[in-house]
Image (spheres, helix red, strand yellow):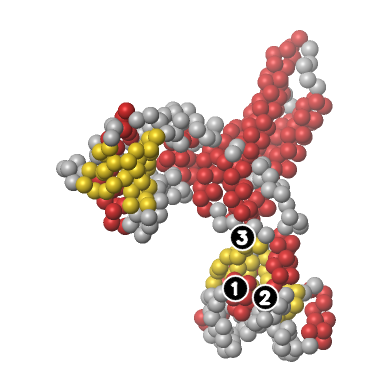
């Protein structure tokens, strides 16, 4: 696929700007090496440098001012990341010098890159398909081992290979049906209706199997959201802090201290869990506290897990089930403040909830609680597979392909011409083609790459 920007040379700072030992600025385009040569002074000209070589020299402004000592890496098309001539300039880190070097590079006529434009060029130049390009952003954003692995497997092409294999099967079936149409007037069927249905059902089974990995894949990628809820002073903030192993939330004996919510992340068995400390659940005349309670309700609806914290030392019978019931998330009950009471005398009151007994102050029961949080959404330690669906876009296109195959099967059973069956099968194939970018609109591409960081 030809790069529509192949006459443009772009540049961007590829490392976070700030105080650091080094910063890297990347250039890519047909004139990238020549443009870098305008401001680089080393032992040889960059235009004469072989691919995959590193060169020490000085960066000089167009008016002859010494800017910095740099190391320059040279990559030549088509064996670079973007498939174009590419230069990477390593300079001293720091706000001022990094921006000064970047401004000097732009002064040669190079254009500042848009978010994700290097990876977009890699896709347009056939260096990777669209799902692999999306995985690049996933690798960069990964906050856990699970998130990193799912993105890396996708970047390696394991998911793409599965999609391409399915698409080949669909196109083979479509071609067979088209040939069958050509011979239909002669009364020589090349494939029976039963065989067509069998193949369609097999393909649907594979598609649905991939779709069934979505919830797990999404949680691996985005993390598992946990809403910590309960009455005021149940010890929610203390438990929040204990799980984080730091004093992140304010803890007070005064009821209603938490008015809004706090969110922080922890890792459990290589998966990111996003803990949200919420406002205490109770009726109140305080409009601000009521708003906090309403936000807690909404968070419960949106979370993967609702962690209900109950104060074992609280003998009052205030019922908060009406706040918690109705949430579709998995529910775990944590009986807190076990250090203050005889646990056995109180635990039986909550036996139906299969609770975890904890003491946020003493950190008792936290290991069991972490295990319960994990097992609430992952039945077992699931091995991450290459065909894991982690993207809403991919899931919706797989579902669209499945619906097209449903229509194809219905058409066969209702005796409709294979011409229409073939149209539905091709529609399913096109949906899969959208996943890997063999069929894609400019709006789709712009939307995907707009979420990338600049410089990647």
Q: Between disc 3 and disc 1, whose residue precedes?
A: 1
Q: Residues within 10 Å of mark 3 (few under 14, many from 20)?
A: many
**SS at mark 2?**
helix
Q: Which residue is painted at 75% across and 88% down in the image? A: 341
Q: Position of residue 131 (x, y in %)?
A: 56, 40
Return the residue at label 2: 323
Can see residue 141? yes
Return the residue at label 1: 245
Q: 204 or 150, which lies in front?
A: 150
Using the image, tell me which numbered label, if any, was put on residue 158: none
Q: Residue 415, located in which quarter of the rendered image?
A: top right
Mark 1 or mark 2, which is nearer to you?
1
Q: Which residue is painted at 66% across and 79% down in the image? A: 360
**SS at mark 1?**
loop
Residues at marks 1 and 2 touching, judged by CB atoms closer than 8 Å: no
Q: Position of residue 391 (x, y in %)?
A: 59, 47
Q: Is residue 349 left or right of residue 425?
A: right
Q: Position of residue 354 (x, y in %)?
A: 80, 72
Calculate the distance from the C-alpha at mark 3 to the C-alpha at mark 1. Answer: 15 Å
Calculate the distance from the C-alpha at mark 1 to the C-alpha at mark 2. Answer: 28 Å
**SS at mark 3?**
strand
Q: Between disc 1 and disc 2, whose residue precedes?
A: 1
Q: Residue 251, located in which quarter of the rendered image?
A: bottom right
Return the residue at label 3: 272
Mark 3 or mark 1, which is nearer to you?
1
Q: Is residue 126 left or right of residue 345?
A: left
Q: Is residue 172 left or right of residue 31?
A: right
Residues at marks 3 and 1 touching, judged by CB atoms closer than 8 Å: no
């Amino acid at each position: 696929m030809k790069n529509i920007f192949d006459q443009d040379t772009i540049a961007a700072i590829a490392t976070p700007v700030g105080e650091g030992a080094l910063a890297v600025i990347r250039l890519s385009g047909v004139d990238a090496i020549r443009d870098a040569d305008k401001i680089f002074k080393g032992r040889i000209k960059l235009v004469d440098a072989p691919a995959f070589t590193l060169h020490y020299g000085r960066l000089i402004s167009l008016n002859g001012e010494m800017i910095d000592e740099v190391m320059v890496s040279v990559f030549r098309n088509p064996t670079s990341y973007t498939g174009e001539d590419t230069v990477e300039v390593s300079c001293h880190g720091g706000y001022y010098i990094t921006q000064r070097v970047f401004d000097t590079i732009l002064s040669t006529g190079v254009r500042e890159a848009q978010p994700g434009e290097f990876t977009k060029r890699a896709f347009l130049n056939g260096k990777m398909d669209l799902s692999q390009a999306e995985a690049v952003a996933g690798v960069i954003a990964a906050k856990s081992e699970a998130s990193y692995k799912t993105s890396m497997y996708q970047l390696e092409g394991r998911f793409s290979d599965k999609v391409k294999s399915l698409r080949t099967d669909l196109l083979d079936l479509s071609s067979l049906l088209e040939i069958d149409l050509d011979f239909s007037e002669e009364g020589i069927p090349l494939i029976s209706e039963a065989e067509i249905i069998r193949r369609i059902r097999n393909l649907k089974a594979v598609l649905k199997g991939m779709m069934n990995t979505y919830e797990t894949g999404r949680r691996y990628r985005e993390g598992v959201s946990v809403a910590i809820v309960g009455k005021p002073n149940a010890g929610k903030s203390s438990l929040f802090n204990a799980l984080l192993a730091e004093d992140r939330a304010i803890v007070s004996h005064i009821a209603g201290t938490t008015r809004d919510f706090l969110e922080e992340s922890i890792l459990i068995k290589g998966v990111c869990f996003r803990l949200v400390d919420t406002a205490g659940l109770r009726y109140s005349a305080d409009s601000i506290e009521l708003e906090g309670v309403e936000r807690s309700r909404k968070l419960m609806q949106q979370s993967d897990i609702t962690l209900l914290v109950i104060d074992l030392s609280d003998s009052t019978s205030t019922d908060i089930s009406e706040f918690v019931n109705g949430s579709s998330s998995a529910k775990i009950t944590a009986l807190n403040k076990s250090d203050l009471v005889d646990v056995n005398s109180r635990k039986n009151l909550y036996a139906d909830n299969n609770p975890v007994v904890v003491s946020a102050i003493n950190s008792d029961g936290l290991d069991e609680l972490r295990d319960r949080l994990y097992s609430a959404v992952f039945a077992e330690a699931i091995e991450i597979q290459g065909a894991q669906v982690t993207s809403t876009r991919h899931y919706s296109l797989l579902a669209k392909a499945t619906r097209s195959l449903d229509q194809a099967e219905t058409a066969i059973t209702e005796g409709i011409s294979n011409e229409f069956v073939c149209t539905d099968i091709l529609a399913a194939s096109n949906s899969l083609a959208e996943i890997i970018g063999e069929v894609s609109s400019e709006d789709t591409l712009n939307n995907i790459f707009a979420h990338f960081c600049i410089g990647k």
